[in-house]
Amino acid sequence: MQEQPIPQGDKSKYTGKQARKAKHIAESYEHRGVGEKEAEQRAWATVNKEDGGGKKPGGSGRKHQDAKSA
């Protein structure tokens, strides 16, 4: 049985800053001898871990108050 590769997610939900960050991280991995595909996977995993994934829905930027503080 042949393993199917995990499909890569849609990168359109990431900000330009996140994409630049991933590109820079991937280049750093490649410089250290990691393969191109592996470097890209690690880079996006790092961006996801640090930034929590792609763009988030907008809002006022204020946190919601807890129900107990009513």
Image: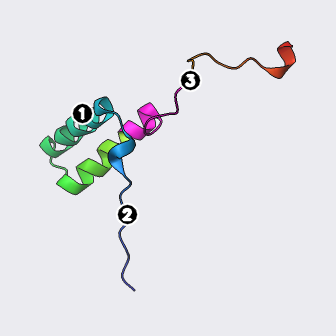
- In the picture, measured across the screen, residue 56 lies left or right of residue 37, that is right
Q: Amino acid at mark 2?
A: Pro
Q: Amino acid at mark 3?
A: Gly
Q: What label does residue 42 carry, if any?
A: none
Q: Amino acid at mark 1?
A: Arg
The span picked out in magenta is 47-58
Query: The C terminus lies in which quarter of the figure?
Result: top right
Residue visible at 83% across and 21% down? Answer: 67
- Residue 46 is a magenta residue: no
Circle 1: element type? helix
Q: Are marks 1 and 2 in contact (CB under 8 Å)?
A: no
Residue 8 quadrant: bottom left
- In the picture, measured across the screen, residue 54 lies left or right of residue 70, that is left
The residue singled out by tag 2 in the image is: 7
Residue visible at 34% across and 47% down? Answer: 11
Circle 2: element type? loop
Point out the tag, 1 or 2, that comes first from the N-terminus.
Answer: 2
Residue 70 in sight: yes
Which numbered disc, 3 or 2, marks the residue closer to the eye?
3
The percent position of residue 12, horizontal first and vertical second, equals 34, 45
Q: In 3D space, how far apart are the residues under numbered discs 1 and 2 (Cα atoms)?
A: 21 Å
- In the picture, measured across the screen, residue 67 lies left or right of residue 43, that is right
Is 19 in front, or is 46? 19
Q: What label does residue 20 carry, if any?
A: 1
Is 61 in front, or is 8? 61
